[in-house]
Amino acid sequence: MKCYIATVTLFLSLFGGTAWAQDVCPDSGNAGTVQYATLYLRTDDTTCTAVDGTYMKTSSTAYDVDIAMEVTGHCQVRINQCSGVPPVCQCVDGPYQFRYIGATILKDNGSQLGSQINPSNLNNIQLLDTRAPTGTSSTGNNWLNGTYEGIHLITSSTAWSNTTCNWTPTSFAASLTVNAVKCEPTFLETNGHITHLDPAASTIHVYLPTAMSGASTALHNAVNEWTSALSGTGVALDVVTSSCGTGADCITVTTSGSLTPCGLAQATGVDPDTGAITAGMTLTIRSDWNTRTCLPPSKGG
């Protein structure tokens, strides 16, 4: 009899009560998970907004880098609760866990722009926009291109709460590429069509005269980038040192002492119905090309 009582007492002390985590319950899953960010590069007066890949002339004009972003989604942690003797366990839903926006860092070519952008409240902001400040007091970061010609890769990295559901990754990003040039490019049109290389020409030769051999390295680099940018169009370019003629498959590099911009591309023959160049392509650069640089070797400012 005493042994029986002792056994019951031990059973009650081990398994009695209202909660006992026997097994780990799976979370109920993530619902409606969305995160996005869009970057905007605008003049201070908001009259001009750059699109991804745009070209702009270097100047002292002040720009704003703005960001609009949103996160959504929630999850539930499930809890294993047990009660009774012998214990009966079941998984029950815990409280909802919501994702919220954290701090954002903006960078230009890896260098941070100004201060980080913070939401007005770390515990309930799912929509943030610096253009007409929503969810934040920040009006974006200032950006100047006047000290650096070349490619600007503007990026953002935004943290968000991973909650007890341990969402991964814990941040998301966006990017915007801007090309700053000393000479602002102007694209020619023919009857409303942008004047362009003819894909039917397949390989287009760029003729560099011997007198301009000092530009060979720069031209090869430019042609390689040009060919890469034209990937998938059926057009490729190469550099030749002998005249390739005046057809649609030849561009002749020449110089001019009266040229105001850095360079000028022209053609004597253009298809009026498509804008495709058919003949007489020349790439004219300034006669002082060997002493003038459009791309400094390092970033300033």
Image (cartoon, rainbow, N blue to C red):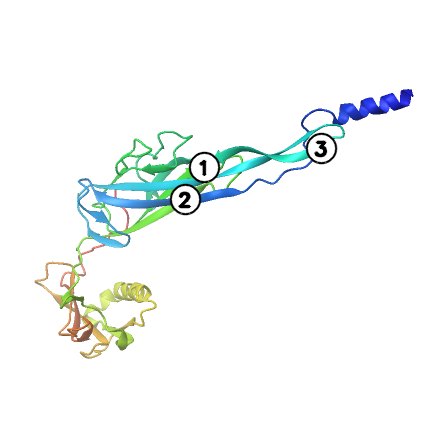
Q: Secondary structure at mark 3?
A: strand
Name the foreground residue: 113 vs 51: 51
Residue at the disc numbered 1 = 99
Residue at the disc numbered 3 = 88
Identity of the amino acid at label 2? Gln
Residue 94 in which image quadrant: top right
Whether residue 16 is visible here, answered yes or no, is yes
Side of 223 relative to 83 (left or right): left
Side of 101 relative to 79 (left or right): left
**Residue occupying the point 54% across, 37% down:** 76
User: Is the Cβ of the residue at disc 1 closer than 8 Å to that at disc 3?
Assistant: no
Q: CA distance from mark 3 to mark 2?
A: 40 Å
Q: How many marks?
A: 3
Residue at the disc numbered 2 = 35
Q: Secondary structure at mark 2?
A: strand
**Residue occupying the point 21% across, 69% down:** 196
Looking at this view, name the residue that lies furthest to the top: 2
Identity of the amino acid at label 3? Val
